[in-house]
Image (cartoon, coloured by chain):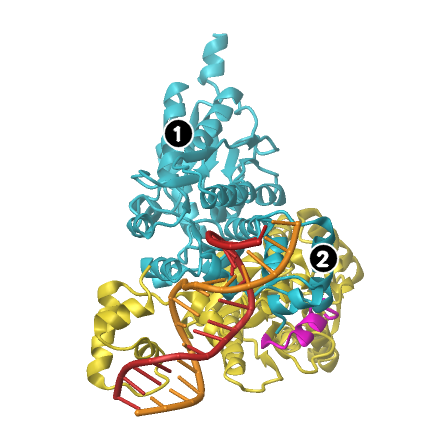
Chain colours: A yellow, B cyan, C red, D orange
Amino acid sequence: MVTIADVARHAGVSPSTVSYTLSGRRSISEATKRRVEQSIRALGYHPHAGARALASARASVVALVLPLRSDMHVPVLMQFATSVVTAARGSDHDVLLLTNDEGPAGLRRVAASSLVDALIVMDVEWHDARIPVLRELGRPSVLIGVPADTQGLSCIDLDFAAAGAQCADHLADLGHRSVALIGQPPAVYERETGFARRMTAGFTDAVRRHRLTGSCYPCSPARDRVRETLGSLLAAQPDVTGLVVHNEPAVAPLLDILREQGRRVPEDMSVIALCPDDLAEQVSPPLTAVSIPAGELGRLAVGLVMDKLDGAEIMETVLLTPELTVRSSTAAPPYRAGGPAARASA
Amino acid sequence: MVTIADVARHAGVSPSTVSYTLSGRRSISEATKRRVEQSIRALGYHPHAGARALASARASVVALVLPLRSDMHVPVLMQFATSVVTAARGSDHDVLLLTNDEGPAGLRRVAASSLVDALIVMDVEWHDARIPVLRELGRPSVLIGVPADTQGLSCIDLDFAAAGAQCADHLADLGHRSVALIGQPPAVYERETGFARRMTAGFTDAVRRHRLTGSCYPCSPARDRVRETLGSLLAAQPDVTGLVVHNEPAVAPLLDILREQGRRVPEDMSVIALCPDDLAEQVSPPLTAVSIPAGELGRLAVGLVMDKLDGAEIMETVLLTPELTVRSSTAAPPYRAGGPAARASA
DNA sequence: ATGAAAGCGCTAACAG
DNA sequence: CTGTTAGCGCTTTCAT
């Protein structure tokens, strides 16, 4: 193995000079800097990560804690993970991948052993068992998702309330009067995952504000459950003309079922989804959708964590403003005798 | 920070005794072992990862190198990643996540700096730029996928040739005489990714063996490209009754399009997919499919890598035998005047 | 602008 | 069965 001493000898300087050349923590004359860098390249020197961590008390590694039981759509998760790795590398850090099967103890382990300097925790629930651990760890962390008590924590997430509102706003603007939200599986609401509730709250508020008729239907993504949900929805609200789908795997089955039933999208039924752009564009018709900016979330999370490692005391909650992209799945509602349009012209 | 010296003092033993209690590398009396373990718990001691790596020349971390430009289906990738983490933790190792945007240099960096002891490299191509680097690194590695020259490398993958053959066999057994493979996007074949070629080779061989008519159609997953591909397929081979789909994102669009065209599955057209079980079960009708055992691949890869870290000199290629699960998307072909059934009874 | 040297916390000989 | 001790390779004071 090539050590810093080898490089120092080769360059005719002391080990500390090599170290400082690498870290830039004190000024080095251009001449020696060049010589050292040449020696480094000539010998193929790579500082030993463990030795560096031991001496400097910094591992230059951040933990990325993924949920095992993922309610987040998998592609979104993956996109997030890769953007975190890329962003971390941009700040000279590596990423240690953790799943939740060790539980909170896993976080304690990697933090206490100085394997990682900081943690990024995904899919945070309203009452999340990992949060007390995070608080006691004394290491910078950023949560993706918003728990009940954000005291002393940095959280970052999509503004799901705004997303729900945007969907309702868009339908209202198009003239829809009766709308519905097809949501996450019931288990997600029971677990009190924040994002699902915030989405429905934002949607419901906007529905009320626009004086629309509308309600929310939790839904499992299995084809038959989607069919059932749509059935009870249409029974309870036969005049519904706009659907908001906050359930990515249910999107395709839903479109199929609507087609089966002879309901055209958007002529008979407008559909808005909360899903990544690529899904929205791959289905037919392309969906008007609020996209989940996984890449940006990842970059922001890493940025926050790096700032905290640099000593910044950021303890805020950042909610990203969602963006609604209009595609071909939404239109004005069909004309209905006795409907608001009829009344308006009467 | 709690150090091994603190624990030793608290337990009234020497640091080395604590170390040996932890590693089990020499026998410790039950009594002291218990005392040490109590002190460890009482003080909340976690060995410093860097110090341990420095002293023992083992980081207890394996790198998982994911492709950024992923031709593998994303859920499969994710499933693989989580199973790797879980399996690695089972062997007291952590997982460092790398993407390919650093290129082969990234592998060199983490290996040379002793950040990781071994590497698991996914989505290996026929002529993969990472392979020469892997060879020179002198660290255990396991490739997921099979490159052109496997000399001195351990590879593990699904036996795609067998998978292709199984699909053709199943259709032949049901009595189909004209079949086709809808494959990966053209770019995948151009890049000479091994698995796509092996799949088509296995399929083509079996087709020949059964004296069927059949050919392969590369296909992009975009809805319109699927429609096009199906069109030219039906033009070239109007009597086709069995489709094998090796293209996960194309599965749903394909089923839609068949439905649009009034072709019932499986009455008019049998469909087999190469995809994870959950996809096969979520679509309608549930698909007869060869599943990609991502979880098992991950576990096996970690097992192999651990064996190599223990000094085993395994340099073989392991191909997992695929399993075809019959569901509702395959059946005997429709009766056709002038077809083989007619001839047989003539 | 550079060197010398003292650790960082742990493991693994070596010594009993 | 247990203790003593010499590093592992690097960073960072403290000197100059």
Q: Are marks 2 and 1 in contact (CB under 8 Å)?
A: no
Q: Does the magenta stretch include residue A137?
A: yes
Q: From the viewer's perspective, is the residue at label 2 or at label 1 nearer?
A: 1
Magenta residues, start to end:
A126-141
Q: Mark 2 points at which residue?
A: A219
Residue A58 shows in the view: yes
Front one among A142 and A161: A142
- Residue A34, picture quadrant: bottom left
Label 2 chain ID: A
Q: Mark 1 points at which residue?
A: B202
Residue at 30% x, 52% y: name it: B133
Query: Pointer 2: residues within 10 angstroms few (<14), some, or many (20+)?
Result: many
Q: In this view, does A312 lie above or below B227?
A: below
- Point out residue A190 in the picture as x, y percentages from the top left corner: 78, 63
Residue at 50% x, 31% y: name it: B321
- Point out residue A219 in the picture as x, y percentages from the top left corner: 72, 57
Callout 1: helix, strand or loop? Answer: helix
Label 1 chain ID: B
- Point out residue B213 in the picture as x, y percentages from the top left corner: 38, 25
